[in-house]
Amino acid sequence: MAQFIREFAIARGLCARSDKFGNLIIRYRRGRGHRPIAFVAHMDHPGFEVTEDATGGFVMTRFLGSVPQQYFRPGGRVRLFSAEGEQRATIWSVPDVDWKKEKLVRLRLKGTVRRGDFGMWDLAPVKTNHRLIWSRACDNLAGCLVLLALLDDMVQSRTPATAYAVFTRAEEVGFHGAMGLTRSRLIPRSAVVVSIESSKELPHAPMGQGPIIRVGDRTTTFDSRVTMFLEEVAARVARTDRRFVFQRRLMDGGTCESTVFCHSGYRAGGVCLAMGNYHNLGPGEHIREEYVDAGDVQKTVQLLIEVARRSNDYGRAPRMLKQRLEAIFERGRRQLLQTAAAMRLPAPATSVLAEPE
């Protein structure tokens, strides 16, 4: 994935820089005076890590990512990636250990693997029709797809903006890549950070209704100024394009990298795609491809282009809100003072907050 992103950037005259943690940062700049916007998507997906060398027979793996134990049924199909090429394996057993501490899975295979090789569920890499996109890893390759499409469109249209497309590692095991990135300091502190995610579809946030401006996740709520900025831009797009729709929701089906950036001193918000079969958890406790709505993907790219173009409008919505509140107060100020005087409440002898003697 990282190699594909590098080649994609080079083909468009852009430079993909990496930090010491393996995160990729692509900077797009045309014109001057634009507030920088950093769009962030993680490259990883829950999968298997081979813990020992093996040739044929059985091999022990460690599953990295949040998937309940009951989905690891004997006979479940896995695809391993090694120097020998792609190999198919099946789940043989799950050792009797604490699943929450260490997700160990024993596989049966015919080929050769080495310690450090990795694997995924043996599902379709990608398939699509006119409405949906299925993949073994929509979370978060759909987010990466959005960022690559964004870069491609801005390069072709010569969009005036200063934007960073940031691709992080190891989100699924505890945001290690994002945490490392905040220490690399390759994203300027003045940048507005927007996490782009594929998030579990919720009853109040269905797919097919456009990009979701994410107020928060399971752990925190995000910077309200960023959220207001994203909503203001989305409303502007909707006024000029009747086909464009969007949602504003609290997506508490999981935690995303916006939480990391918010608590590392950045102004951060989030935009996500509603996704089905979150972490490949299909109906009836069966492993299935994840899927997103193709129209949602297109509308998310459309929104982010406008966000990059209008980055200098950041802070405008909070200022306008303050002005509206001040105007409302001024309209009622005189009556408020008159009724307060008529109430003739006696002034307290001492402050209610005063310390007792």
Image (tube, rainbow, N blue to C red):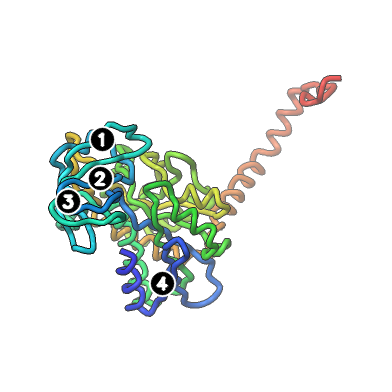
Q: Residue 245, can we see it?
A: no
Residue, x 20% and y 40% (percent of image)? 282
Q: How many marks?
A: 4
Give how far apart the Cα atoms at labels 1 and 2 are: 9 Å
In the picture, measured across the screen, residue 66 lies left or right of residue 36, that is left
Secondary structure beneath dot 3 equals loop
Instruction: List the residue tagged with mark 4.
Output: 16
Amino acid type, residue under disc 1 in the picture: Pro
Label 1 or label 3, whichever comes before in sequence order: 1
Separation (CA) of disc 1 from disc 4: 42 Å
Asked if disc 1 and disc 2 are in contact, CB closer than 8 Å, the reply is: yes
Eye-nearest disc, 3 or 4: 3
Q: Where is residue 194 in the image (x, y as percent from the top left)?
A: 45, 56
Real-space CA distance between mark 3 and mark 4, rounded to the nearest whole angstrom: 30 Å
Residues under labels 2 and 4: Cα distance? 35 Å
Q: Is residue 24 above or below residue 231?
A: below
How many residues crowd around disc 3 within 10 Å: few (fewer than 14), some, or many (20 or more)? some
Pinpoint residue 257: horizontal percent, then vertical percent: 44, 50
Q: Which mark is residue 299?
A: none
Q: Where is residue 56 in the image (x, y as percent from the top left)?
A: 15, 51
Circle 3 residue: 122
Is residue 195 or residue 109 the one in the foreground?
109
| Type of amino acid at the residue the image marks with label 4 | Ala
Mark 1 or mark 4, earlier in chain: 4
Do the CB atoms of the residues marked 3 and 4 lie less than 8 Å apart? no
**Which element carries disc 4, helix, strand or loop?**
strand
Amino acid of disc 2: Met
Q: Which mark is residue 60?
A: 2
Query: Rounded to the nearest whole Å, what is the CA distance between mark 1 and mark 3?
Result: 21 Å
**Which secondary structure, mark 2?**
strand
Callout 4: 10 Å neighbours few (<14), some, many (20+)?
many
> Is 249 on the left-hand or right-hand side of 228?
left
